[in-house]
Amino acid sequence: MLSVENLHIRFRTGDGMVHAVNDVSFEVGAGRQIAVVGESGSGKSQIALAIMGLLAKNAEVEGRIMWNGQDLLAASNREMNRIRAREIGIVFQDPMSSLNPYMTIERQLTEIVEYHEGLSRRDARARALQVMDAVRISDAKARLRAYPHEFSGGMRQRIVIAMALMCQPKLILADEPTTALDVTVQAQIMRLLADVQRDLGTSVVLITHDLGVVAGFCEEVVVLYGGRIMEEAETIALFDRPTHPYTRGLLSAVPNIKDPSDALTAIPGSPPSQHRFPQACPFAPRCVDAVDVCRDTLPALRQGRACLRPVEELT
Ligand SMILES: Nc1ncnc2c1ncn2[C@@H]1O[C@H](COP(=O)(O)OP(=O)(O)OP(=O)(O)O)[C@@H](O)[C@H]1O
Ligand SMILES: [Mg+2]
């Protein structure tokens, strides 16, 4: 359904080029849930913004983003508006930035479909009640009259998901939808996204820096580092047998509930400079397994891993 092909995103800045996303490819099938995982600055949000056609003005993009046979990077503004309104929804990390504090919840939900689908006020309201139900907000009739500040953080995030659902999209891009929430509410929102996926068949791309939230939710994981894919695998396989040193490092930074005595380790060092297109493995400077060749050769992604070292030889 969605196929990102050799996507490159660069930004022109006063300091030269920033290579934010370098040759990223992945696919999302109908009804699938995939996670894009990586630390801050790895290029996650820019991939989502590129799909929505919302990159900053100083961006240069290369590659293709195929959506049901159409290249979104070549689509007109008008066409992108239609796709954003009807086919692909986005949910951001901070619900307050997507909600208008001066408008009732009802108006924020109904405006979208009145404008984009020409629904009457009455039909729009009926749809709003349906999506409030889908995001498990009880007493929806009364709550539609409320303003965003009258809701808790978790409820606001549900409203933002409801907004994305108003247009009955085929795909939802969820960009760190739970980061601002406490752990129990996080779990509820993840469960909600899973229910939405199951009940409505919506595909989900979950963007997160937290491998921990991926496990129970996504079927497949794409691990990004320095704007490149390091590893790509089915979630179960990735947790069972990570084959890239970076993924191994990330996993040993996730607490192990079964064995709390298991030490948490941090990956030493800091993310790479993005002022040059990578000429070598971007993770090599921080990699415990790096050898000389890693520092001057850029590994290609083969069989789901971009690493020059054989798996058997990793520490
Ligand atoms: N308009 C811009 N001009 C220059 N550089 C930019 C611009 N927008 C983003 N970048 C850079 O692109 C890189 C990737 O940014 P991105 O927002 O995708 O990171 P991220 O993985 O979403 O991180 P986080 O987890 O912090 O949200 C960063 O180094 C960022 O500074
Ligand atoms: Mg981001």
Image (cartoon, rainbow, N blue to C red):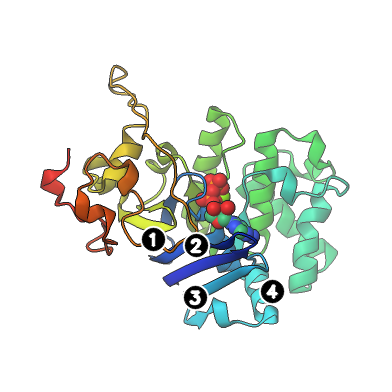
Q: Give the amino acid type for the residue marked by disc 1 in the picture.
A: Pro
Query: Helix, strand or loop at disc 3?
Result: strand
Find residue 19 and name its label. Answer: 2
Q: Give the amino acid type for the residue marked by disc 3 in the picture.
A: Glu
Q: Is residue 28 visible?
A: no
Query: Helix, strand or loop at disc 1?
Result: loop
Q: Quadrant of the C terminus?
A: top left
Q: Residues within 10 Å of mark 3 (few under 14, many from 20)?
A: some
Name the residue: 47% across, 43% down. 209
Query: Which residue lies under the disc numbered 3?
Result: 62
Whichever of labels 1 and 3 marks the residue nearer the N terminus, that label is 3
Determine whether, in the image, residue 300 is placed left or right of residue 191: left
Calculate the distance from the C-alpha at mark 2 to the C-alpha at mark 4: 27 Å
| Mark 3 or 2, closer to the camera | 2
Find residue 278 and name its label. Answer: 1
Question: From the Cβ of disc 4, is ligand 1 less than 8 Å away?
Answer: no
Name the residue: 68% across, 68% down. 57
Q: Nearer the viewer, residue 97 or 202?
A: 97
